[in-house]
Amino acid sequence: MKLSVLMPVYNEARTLRTIVRRVLDAPVDADLELVAVDDGSTDRSFEVLQELAVSDDRIVVLRHPVNRGKGAAIRTAVARMTGDVAVVQDSDLEYDPADFPRLLKPILEDRADAVFGSRFAASPERRVLLYWHSLGNRLLTWFANVLNDLNLTDMETCYKAVRADFLKDLRLRSDRFGIEPELTTRLAQSGARIYEVPISYHGRTYAEGKNIGWRDGAQAMWLLFKFRFLDTRFTDDFGRGTLQSLGSSPQISRWVVEQFDGAIGDRVLEAGSGTGNITPLLLDRERIVSLDIDHPYVRQLDHRYGHLENFSAVKADLEDPETFVKLEGEGFDTVICINVLEHLDRPDVAVRGFHRILRPGGRVLVLVPAHRSLYSAMDEAIEHRKRYEDGELRELLDAAGFHIERLAPFNRLGVVGWSVNRWTGRKSISRMQVSAFRLMMPLARALERAEGLRGLSWIAVARKVE
């Protein structure tokens, strides 16, 4: 494991040598790199960093020609880091790198994706001063908890350790101290497993160089609201963002699974599980295997449900025939494949594989996006290769040897929302749109009984003939 310590620096020449030495001497059993970003300092900070880097090749020094703020410096460091886990380290002496092992432990034990070092959770040691500053921190933490359904004790802590793959995937935009509320909100929106551990804290006074004030607190309140309700896209991966938004409404997932009532057997392969939006609805089966090509999704599902004896999460490629050779012994009677085939260059390989692993009489349950005329910038952004016409889906299933029992349009109301997104050029579905659709579900259910209306998707149920 390699640890990247990200250090934003602004006019800290008086403490740099001491804090850099403490970071490099931190008691961690891992390779370590220190990515220090001088953020337009007007003192000798940049020169000190250069001198230190000459004597230790673990130090990487970057520079902003003008002061852009702590958040901008952290983003620059994230882009340059090469470690598996990142810890943000301020360049003053308020936070002690001796706490690194405590911060890293939940991540190294694969229990957490992010760990916050709390100054208020029974800290082993902290300096007593600045009551109003402490009160402001607690107020901001309370507001962050209310908006994001968390129970943190210290949202504004500068000690946050985050797995590199999670951190690099987050869409961070704040330049100044707003990086703390933004990072907290984005981690919550991404579904990250967040832990807290107590840390030591040696706060400094304003005379000693503390440069955060009430205006930064007011801005943090605004940013917490903004990122929760107005700017909710937590990642530049539009596919993942859309899946996460849809996952915020279990009612929609249940509605989708209801379309296959009576056809879902006891031994189920979920082919293309994604973030696991329908997985919880299948856990009552005798056997459930959730398969996806994306390792983070598989790991996430394994963390959630891997303790269940009837569940397995598997990383595999549906376009690789060997995948199905390895699954033949499972004796599946159902394959459920929702919004997956449209992502494949060779969906025929996947469908033939489904036929191979199913018991005689077993069923494949498919949902795919419908109608080429609805193809949009969103389809392209979330990597849809195509949208299917009913004849194309029928031909795909027939060619694999399946007997089609049902092929029908689904989600007629969704055509309206998708068309609006298509006309406006949107590239992902937001949580607000999902919430609005959830409120209109009675209408959506009623429209399913209307004949002659196009659906946003096709539903297919096909049986392996004995």
Image (spheres, grey):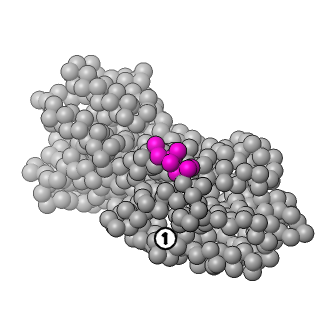
Residue 443 is one of the magenta-drawn residues: yes
Quarter of the figure with residue 461: bottom right
- Residue 289 as seen in the image, left or right of residue 376: right
Q: Quadrant of the C terminus?
A: bottom right
Quarter of the figure with residue 83: bottom left
Residue 418 lies, with reference to residue 85, above or below; the image says below
- The residue drawn where x is 77% and y is 51% is 262
Q: Is residue 150 visible?
A: yes
Using the image as rendered, state which of residue 303 and residue 392 is in the foreground: 392
Q: Secondary structure at mark 1?
A: loop
Q: Position of residue 221 (x, y in %)?
A: 25, 35
Q: What is the tally of numbered marks visible in this picture?
A: 1
- The residue drawn where x is 53% and y is 66% is 454
Using the image as rendered, state which of residue 44 and residue 396 is in the foreground: 396
Residue 243 lies, with reference to residue 364, above or below; the image says above
- Magenta-highlighted stretch: main secondary structure? helix
Q: Position of residue 432 (x, y in %)?
A: 39, 47
Quarter of the figure with residue 360: bottom right
Residue 290 is one of the magenta-drawn residues: no
Residue 15 lies, with reference to residue 121, above or below; the image says below
Q: Which residue is mark 1?
A: 383
Q: Position of residue 428 (x, y in %)?
A: 41, 60
Using the image as rendered, state which of residue 183 and residue 288 is in the foreground: 288
Q: Is residue 141 visible?
A: no
Q: Position of residue 280 (x, y in %)?
A: 65, 45
- The residue drawn where x is 77% and y is 55% is 263
Q: Residue furthest left?
A: 42
- The residue drawn where x is 58% and y is 55% is 448
Q: Residue furthest front?
A: 451
Q: Residues within 10 Å of mark 1 (few under 14, many from 20)?
A: some
Which segment is the magenta one?
A: 439-446
Residue 284 lies, with reference to residue 318, above or below; the image says above
